């Protein structure tokens, strides 16, 4: 925290001058939904509209009359309201809109149909387009969809487009990143206090940075592309307080599987999930992302972790955009508060076919498996591979089932080949994986997490049993409808690979 | 099929009647976003060219969105269980189809609910068919959970489905259903997926919030669709916003 150049104190002013300036500007131009060419006319007219600013007051912690949660505060600021309550419907200014190759073409289609063939997006620096789903495939329509994104980005002068042209070698594409939610974080698009919308349900991952982030459909995204704002309902907040020292055989994946098992796959529908407590404070950014990533598996609208020194440190070399974190007031009203003593938890899995079908990993030790998959926005980050490598290293053994590794992004892939694994005497993850007999790390993308085109690497084309670090295990998720998916942490996935059965990682880590 | 006093044709019918009561969805946010101001700007360049084949199936033709409507759906129902996720509604391998392209929209429809496990021996869409014969889907809790793919309500609508009746919905699916106007996502009061069977003939009377199962002769209460109804009837948020004057119309 001390190293940060911004003012992270919870008591900092809710609105600074820069924000006021931005809002003035936005009320003058962003309300226009006509094409940019005509904006000189519309600006003059729009400026007559009275921006709602006189009522705005500082509203962070301290002696405030109307206490709010951090989700409410972010939406209040973005909707230029002094305060909000759960259930309020407000027009929210969007800081970043992300789309990818699966939903981008449809969103663009709606944008063009509704705003006109010559329309311009509301802000070409706030639209982030990340091809990541169906990249390394010979499926012509999938390839065409990336072409549609490229044409649109050229036409609209989109600043942040992470393109890929040479599909035979991803390394030949310096702009290509990979899985959008991880790329957003690594490229500095996730910032505390902001509003991020994406055409992907796991957009909620970015809540790890103390921002409001949620998934939307093509039609809503088409609207945002033209208008820069969206009507959103303010969610009530469920609070999850996790205290206690994290045992060294647990990962954030175990924590979120614990929570989903507790509240069910619909337990947080329409709600925000706020994570805090000493355990959460001890988690690095990638682990916090895992926690927020799966709030949608509980039906949640967004997940959020208060920004702190860990957050500011992560952002230091990633963004130069000024941001201002907000925090829940002490007196804020939460729908329900759940408390967990993390030191008492054990490694978990979610059995087929639902993410809330929770069981202890050791209870499933007789479940024979056919393969292990480590990848995706949930479990394909650098820390996830380091965790898997730690188990392989501790065992010194070889895997008994095919073990597929799909780094989320090009940066993660690089880390596997360059970062020394702690306690290994300087070995990299890739060396450890090779010694353990895993498949060579594949090209970064969403891979087989969601099945995808038939020729997708590691897709389940047979009715097999898989232990996976991904996020969903509904029927057919990874390809075959009769396939069985056990969701687990990278520790549990690696341990299971070593035995060929669902395995508690304590068998190797203790 | 049990005898029923209500007659129906083999092809399902779709009728609406209206009253002139105007009830704009966003009327309680007077200061938030004044769409109508934009009407004073040049707008001749905005092209409205919705191809006929992309008109959402739930949309009655030529209906003014400003009217509150009493809509009736009638046809065969297809019954599913709890937590029908988006991978079962439209598996990811079909997501290369872009819903805003008319031919691909039709194709998406032909894959609706193809991801249901083989335990569903009666399929939603018969082999080699593009459309379903089931106009109404009846599900349990948390219908449409999972991904944010708008392809899910679009596939159902493109297949010829007009309404889903479920105990509850996942948030993004519900929102996508309304904003596209593809299907009516209606909540049931009880657990209708255990009361009805696939192939039953049902009628939904939206204004009365009622479902009649003609096969069993029973009636059930539904939760009101509320302000979402006129948006779906108009054909989605853009069409609704134009018809109510929130944003400029196309001509």
Image (tube, grey):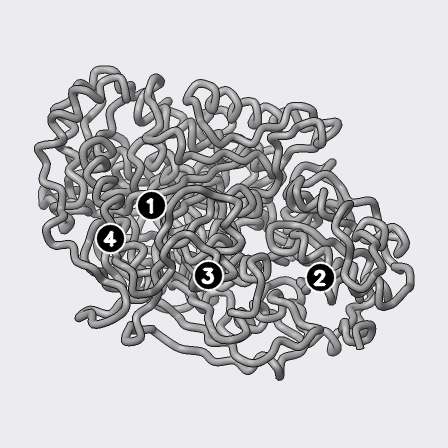
Mark nearest the camera among 1 and 4 is 4
Q: Earlier in the sequence, mark 2 or mark 3?
A: 3
3D distance between C-alphas at marks 2 and 3: 32 Å
**What is the x, y in percent for residue A330?**
31, 75
Name the quadrant of the C terminus of chain A.
bottom right
Q: Are marks 1 and 4 in contact (CB under 8 Å)?
A: no
Residue at 82% x, 75% y is A507
Give the labeled residue for mark 1: B178
Task: Using the rendered image, report if marks 1 and 4 lie on a common chain.
Answer: no
**How busy is the neighbourhood of tag 3: few (under 14 within 10 Å), some, or many (20 plus)?**
few
**How busy is the neighbourhood of tag 4: few (under 14 within 10 Å), some, or many (20 plus)?**
some
**What is the x, y in percent for residue B48?**
29, 21
A329 vs B1, left or right, is left
**What is the x, y in percent for residue A4?**
45, 55
Mark nearest the camera among 1 and 2 is 2
SS class of the residue under badge 2? helix
3D distance between C-alphas at marks 1 and 4: 34 Å
Q: Are marks 4 and 2 in contact (CB under 8 Å)?
A: no
Q: Earlier in the sequence, mark 4 or mark 3?
A: 3
Give the labeled residue for mark 3: A2
Q: Are marks 2 and 3 in contact (CB under 8 Å)?
A: no
Residue at 47% x, 20% y is A154
């Amino acid at each position: 925290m001390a190293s940060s150049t911004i003012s992270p104190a919870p008591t900092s002013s809710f609105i600074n001058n820069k924000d006021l300036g931005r809002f003035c500007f936005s009320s003058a131009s962003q309300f226009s939904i006509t094409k940019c060419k005509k904006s000189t006319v519309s600006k003059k007219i729009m400026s007559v509209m009275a921006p709602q600013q006189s009522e705005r007051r500082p509203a962070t912690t301290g002696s405030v009359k109307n206490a709010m949660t951090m989700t409410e505060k972010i939406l209040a600021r973005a909707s230029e309201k002094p305060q909000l309550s759960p259930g309020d419907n407000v027009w929210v200014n969007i800081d970043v809109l992300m789309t990818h190759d699966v939903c981008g073409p449809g969103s663009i289609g709606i944008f063009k149909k509704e705003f006109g063939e010559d329309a311009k997006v509301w802000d070409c620096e706030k639209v982030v387009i990340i091809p990541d789903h169906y990249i390394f495939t010979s499926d012509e329509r999938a390839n065409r969809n990336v072409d549609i994104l490229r044409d649109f980005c050229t036409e609209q002068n989109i600043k942040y487009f992470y393109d890929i042209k040479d599909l035979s070698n991803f390394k030949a594409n310096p702009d290509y990143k990979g899985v959008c939610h991880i790329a957003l974080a690594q490229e500095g698009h996730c910032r505390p206090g902001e509003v991020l919308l994406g055409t992907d349900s796991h957009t909620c991952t970015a809540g790890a940075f103390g921002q409001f982030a949620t998934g939307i459909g093509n039609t809503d995204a088409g609207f945002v592309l033209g208008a820069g704002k969206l009507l959103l309902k303010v969610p009530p907040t469920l609070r999850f307080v996790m205290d206690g020292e994290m045992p060294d055989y647990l990962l954030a994946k175990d924590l979120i599987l614990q929570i989903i098992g507790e509240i069910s796959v619909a337990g947080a529908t329409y709600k925000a999930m706020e994570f805090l407590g000493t355990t959460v404070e001890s988690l690095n950014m990638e682990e916090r992302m895992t926690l927020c990533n799966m709030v949608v598996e509980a039906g949640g609208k967004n997940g959020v972790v208060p920004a702190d020194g860990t957050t500011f440190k992560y952002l230091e070399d990633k963004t130069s955009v000024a941001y201002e974190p907000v925090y829940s007031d002490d007196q804020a009203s939460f729908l329900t508060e759940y408390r967990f003593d993390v030191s008492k938890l054990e490694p978990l899995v979610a059995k087929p076919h639902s993410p809330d079908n929770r069981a202890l990993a050791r209870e499933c030790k007789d479940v024979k498996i056919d393969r292990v998959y480590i990848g995706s926005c949930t479990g394909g980050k650098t820390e996830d591979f380091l965790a898997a490598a730690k188990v392989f290293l501790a065992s010194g053994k070889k895997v008994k089932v095919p073990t597929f590794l799909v780094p989320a992004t090009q940066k993660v892939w690089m880390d596997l080949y360059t970062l020394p694994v702690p306690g290994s005497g300087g070995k990299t993850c890739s060396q450890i994986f090779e010694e353990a007999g895993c498949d060579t790390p594949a090209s970064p993308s969403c891979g087989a997490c969601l099945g995808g085109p038939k020729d997708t690497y590691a897709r389940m084309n047979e009715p097999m049993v898989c232990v996976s670090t991904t996020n969903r295990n509904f029927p057919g998720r990874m390809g075959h409808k009769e396939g069985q998916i056990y969701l687990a942490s990278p520790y549990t996935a690696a341990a299971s690979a070593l035995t060929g059965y669902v395995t508690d990682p304590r068998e190797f880590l203790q | 099929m049990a005898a029923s006093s209500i007659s129906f044709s083999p092809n399902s019918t779709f009728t609406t009647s209206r009253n002139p009561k105007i009830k704009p969805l966003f009327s309680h946010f007077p200061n938030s976003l004044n769409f109508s101001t934009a009407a004073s700007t040049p707008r001749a360049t905005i092209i409205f060219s919705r191809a006929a084949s992309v008109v959402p199936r739930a949309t009655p033709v030529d209906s003014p969105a400003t009217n509150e409507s009493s809509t009736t759906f009638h046809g065969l129902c297809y019954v599913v269980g709890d937590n029908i996720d988006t991978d079962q509604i439209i598996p990811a391998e079909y997501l290369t189809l872009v819903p805003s392209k008319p031919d691909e929209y039709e194709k998406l429809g032909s894959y609706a609910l193809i991801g249901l496990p083989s335990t569903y021996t009666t399929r939603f869409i018969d082999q080699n068919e593009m459309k379903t014969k089931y106009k109404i889907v009846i599900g349990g809790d948390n219908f449409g959970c999972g991904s944010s793919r708008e392809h899910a309500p679009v596939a159902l609508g493109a297949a010829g489905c007009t309404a889903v009746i479920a105990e509850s919905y996942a948030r993004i699916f519900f929102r996508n259903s309304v904003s596209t106007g593809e299907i009516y996502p209606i909540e049931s009061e009880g657990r209708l997926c255990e009361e009805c069977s696939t192939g039953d003939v049902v009628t939904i009377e939206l204004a009365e919030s009622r479902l009649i199962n003609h096969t069993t002769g029973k009636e059930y209460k539904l939760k009101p669709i509320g302000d979402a109804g006129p948006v779906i009837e108009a054909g989605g948020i853009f069409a609704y916003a134009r018809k109510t004057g929130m944003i400029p119309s196309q001509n």
